[in-house]
Image (cartoon, rainbow, N blue to C red):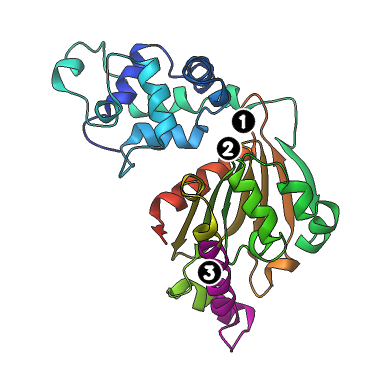
């Protein structure tokens, strides 16, 4: 936490939106006015905490900034994510303690919902079982946005035909693909963990990155901007695919087990924003922000 609070934190308090549910409702209302397609895109509770704690190294996505500027028109996004000016703090009421602020933003009452399984709709013992129940074409055909982070992203690059992916992006879909860096240390550590001695994962990931970069060159200039490829070099924990800002396919990476043998979870974003979709969307966003564009 910054010694001097971020302006956004102070402005949220001034507008009496400290409770996450209240902020979420106000954000979604502003989002609908900015653009109907942004309805329901409020940040997760964890994401909001990062926004207000001074942990961000750069501004959030442009759409988030547009909505925040609509919520608080007297400030720009650059100002909202900068330390609060002294003259604004001078007009603050009695100071809130950090524990009070945390209690407001993370109220237990806001977390409680009617579904004991949050927004998880299905669980599969392995990715193979998941793929049988939900083949790639059933998940991806007609998608308007796909965000994927993991190791080699085989579902996108090996199991879904190039021509279908090409047509999807030409028709307006956006794709963000984040691979484990084939030149990094983390992928070599994962190869050792899975027992590979022939650079199998490194070679496969290079090939899959090439599949997407080659496809991008075939796209029209406008469509090329809708396909983004990046890499990251961190201990791999999850494979995450987010589809249409509504559906999340999540799989943990287990010790000494191939990805195809790991359990897979399906979550669907709910209206309260209290489920696991927001949690894994936040993980994806943080990884993407730390990634390196290819």
Mark 3: few/some/many CA within 10 Å (<14, 14-19, 20+): few
Secondary-structure class at tag 3: helix
Marks 2/1: CA–CA distance: 7 Å
Residue on which the image places disc 2: 278
| Magenta-drawn segment | 190-214
Q: Nearer the viewer, mark 3 or mark 2?
A: 3
Q: Which residue is painted at 41% across and 57% down in the image? A: 291
| Depicted 182 relative to depicted 293: above or below | below
Name which residue lies at 71% across and 60% down: 161
**Quadrant showing the N terminus:** top left
Q: Is residue 125 magenta?
A: no
Residue under numbered circle 3: 210
The residue pinned by badge 1 equals 274
Q: Residue furthest bottom?
A: 197
Residue at the spot 59% in from the left edge and 47% down from the top edge: 169
Helix, strand or loop: magenta stretch: helix
Please name whichever residue, 94 or 75, is drawn nearer the observer in this view of the structure: 75
Relative to 34, 155 lies left or right: right
Query: Which mark sits nearer the N-terminus, 3 or 2?
Result: 3
Judge from the rendering whether residue 26 lies leftward or rightward of residue 238; answer left or right. Answer: left
Q: Is residue 178 visible?
A: no
Secondary element at tag 1 = loop
Marks 3 and 2 close (CB-CB < 8 Å): no
Q: In terms of image quadrants, where is residue 244?
A: top right
Q: Position of residue 20 (x, y in %)?
A: 50, 23
């Amino acid at each position: 936490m910054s010694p001097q609070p971020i302006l956004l934190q102070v402005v949220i308090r001034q507008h009496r939106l400290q409770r996450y549910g209240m902020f979420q409702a106000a954000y979604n209302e502003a989002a609908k006015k900015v653009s109907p397609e942004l309805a329901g895109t409020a940040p997760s509770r964890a994401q909001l905490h990062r926004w207000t704690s001074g942990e961000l190294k750069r501004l959030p996505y442009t759409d988030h900034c547009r909505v925040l500027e609509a919520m608080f028109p007297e400030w720009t996004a650059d100002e909202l994510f900068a330390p609060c000016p002294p003259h604004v703090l001078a007009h603050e009421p009695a100071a809130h303690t950090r524990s009070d602020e945390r209690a407001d933003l993370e109220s237990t009452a806001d977390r409680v919902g009617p579904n004991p399984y949050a927004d998880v709709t299905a669980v599969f013992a392995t990715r193979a079982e998941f793929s049988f129940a939900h083949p790639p074409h059933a998940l991806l055909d007609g998608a308007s946005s796909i965000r994927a982070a993991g190791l080699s992203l085989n579902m996108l690059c090996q199991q879904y035909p190039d021509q279908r992916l090409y047509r999807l992006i030409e028709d307006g879909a956006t794709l963000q693909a984040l691979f484990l860096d084939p030149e990094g240390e983390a992928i070599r550590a994962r190869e050792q963990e899975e027992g590979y001695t022939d650079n199998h994962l490194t070679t496969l990931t290079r090939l899959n990155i090439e599949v997407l970069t080659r496809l991008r060159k075939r796209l029209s200039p406008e469509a090329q901007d809708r396909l983004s490829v990046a890499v990251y070099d961190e201990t791999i924990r999850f494979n995450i695919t987010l589809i249409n800002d509504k559906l999340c396919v999540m799989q943990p990476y287990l010790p000494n087990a191939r990805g195809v043998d790991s359990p897979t979870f399906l979550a669907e974003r709910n209206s309260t924003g209290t489920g696991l979709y927001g949690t894994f969307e936040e993980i994806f966003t943080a990884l993407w922000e730390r990634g390196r564009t290819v």
